[in-house]
Image (cartoon, rainbow, N blue to C red):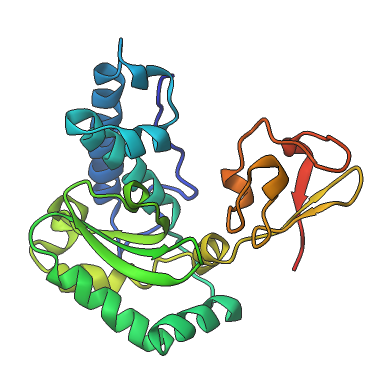
């Protein structure tokens, strides 16, 4: 399996001035490309050669882990940003208030974690198997997938993420970051969506899972194996559609 550069969901210059075209050209175009190129070179002839990226992150160590995790982390980060930020969905605000006391408390704690991480690394909002939200800071290529946690949101605090635009002013970069987050994508990751079979109207509910076929309660639809099928009519997974809430 050869890993490729992800497409950005916006034009390279669209995040300016908070994140300049030059930063995107270097951070996305050069740094991420290098991690992906290194990964493709390192996995040749290894058991990781045929694995999807997330499985490599969960299983590998050393140079393969570092390049796989940085490829995954950066892809997640860039796809989480938007030049046209919309207001936070009420359901997401309610979850943040439930687990952090308020949205403002969450923002302060996340900012503090991003400012306090020494050197290079990532700060994550994660969900555990009970969908409880917490903040974790991990150095270097650290990724919460290795701890059985579900990434919901992240900020890259390696200097290459902000040095072109903000030099050593990490605080200014973090302040700008808050205005680039696609809150609807964040909400989709921590509010598991239900999916409906288009043939028989069976609804897969992540809270219930499908224990009879080995799908544990709390498993998001996106994490069900591709060979799973509707337990009522046998229709393939790719024939399911999201339920409009």
**Number of dots carrying numbers:** 0
Q: Residue at x 48, y 84 (%)?
A: 98
From the viewer's perspective, is residue 136 above or below residue 48? below
Between 24 and 56, the residue placed more toward the observer is 56
From the viewer's perspective, is residue 241 above or below residue 86? above
Question: Residue 89: in sight, yes or no?
Answer: no
Please state the horizontal and vertical placement of residue 154, each as a whole percent of the image: 34, 60
Q: Residue at x 69, y 41 (%)?
A: 213
Between 193 and 77, the residue placed more toward the observer is 193
Please state the horizontal and vertical placement of residue 70, each as a whole percent of the image: 27, 41
On-image quarter of the N terminus: top left
Q: Quadrant of residue 163?
A: bottom left
Between 80 and 99, the residue placed more toward the observer is 99
Question: Residue 106: in sight, yes or no?
Answer: yes
Q: Residue furthest right?
A: 200
From the viewer's perspective, is residue 59 above or below residue 211? above
Q: Quadrant of residue 90?
A: bottom right
Please state the horizontal and vertical placement of residue 46, each as a whole percent of the image: 30, 15
Q: Residue at x 56, y 45 (%)?
A: 223
């Amino acid at each position: 399996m050869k890993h490729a550069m992800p497409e950005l969901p916006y034009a390279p210059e669209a995040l300016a001035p908070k994140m300049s075209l030059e930063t995107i050209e270097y951070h996305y175009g050069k740094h991420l490309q290098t991690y992906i190129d290194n990964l493709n070179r390192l996995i040749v002839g290894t058991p990781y050669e045929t694995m999807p990226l997330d499985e490599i992150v969960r299983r590998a160590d050393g140079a393969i882990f570092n390049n796989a995790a940085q490829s995954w982390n950066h892809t997640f980060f860039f796809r989480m940003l938007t030049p046209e930020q919309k207001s936070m969905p009420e359901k997401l605000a309610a979850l943040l208030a439930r687990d952090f006391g308020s949205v403002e408390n969450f923002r302060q704690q996340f900012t503090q974690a991003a400012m306090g991480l020494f050197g290079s690394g990532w700060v994550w909002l994660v969900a555990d198997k009970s969908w409880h939200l917490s903040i974790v800071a991990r150095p270097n290529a650290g990724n919460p997938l290795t701890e059985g946690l579900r990434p919901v949101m992240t900020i890259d605090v390696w200097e290459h993420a902000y040095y072109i635009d903000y030099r050593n002013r990490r605080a200014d970069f973090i302040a700008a970051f808050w205005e680039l987050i696609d809150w609807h994508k964040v909400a989709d990751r921590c509010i598991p969506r239900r999916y409906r079979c288009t043939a028989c109207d069976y609804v897969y509910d992540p809270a219930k899972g499908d224990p009879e076929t080995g799908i544990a309660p709390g498993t998001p639809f996106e994490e069900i194996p591709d060979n799973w099928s509707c337990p009522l009519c046998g229709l393939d997974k790719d024939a399911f559609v999201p339920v409009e809430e």
